[in-house]
Image (tube, grey):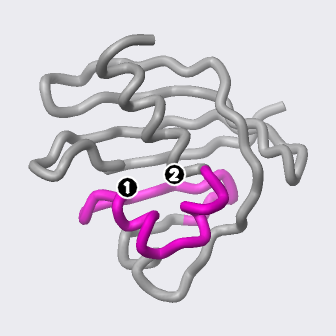
Amino acid sequence: MRGLEQEIYELECSHIHPEVRISKQKLGEVLDDEFYEIGSSGRIWRRADYDEDHALTPDEMEISDFLLHPLGEEAVLTTYQIWNKTSGKKSLRSSVWKKRTSGWKLFFHQGTPSK
């Protein structure tokens, strides 16, 4: 991987890291103000849900099959698979990242259970 692909891959890895998942502040540095998520549980999440006292589980996860799909100069789509080492479950993931003045921010995320 090179350039933009490497940068976005590292951002994807950062927001699934247990240390970031349990920190409202660190997660807030990754999420866009307009963040929207459809979780693998089927639940809808918005940025405000993470600004409250909600904490994600500090699961250990690993990304594979990462692909970057440019959507223009200021947006990219990523697709990949997650293996949740803690639960033993796999899911397919997609994210839309938008370039903001403060850097790339996670705008949309979806998880779909897989086998």
Q: What segment carries the magenta color?
A: 17-43
Q: Which mark is residue 7?
A: none
The single residue placed furthest to the right in the displayed view is 88
Question: Mark 2 highlights which residue?
Answer: 15
Query: Pointer 1 and pointer 2: residues touching (CB < 8 Å)?
Result: yes
Name the residue: 51% across, 47% down: 14
Query: Residue 83 falls in which quadrant of the image?
Result: top right
Q: Which mark is residue 30?
A: 1
**Residue 39 position within the rendered picture, expressed as x and y whole percent measured from the top left:** 59, 56
Q: Quadrant of the C terminus?
A: top right
Q: Amino acid at mark 1?
A: Val
**Residue 50 position within the rendered picture, expressed as x and y whole percent measured from the top left:** 46, 75
Name the residue: 51% across, 51% down: 15
Name the side, left or right, on which 39 lies relative to 4: right
Please say whether residue 40 is one of the residues in the magenta stretch: yes
Say whether disc 1 or disc 2 marks the residue closer to the N-terminus: 2
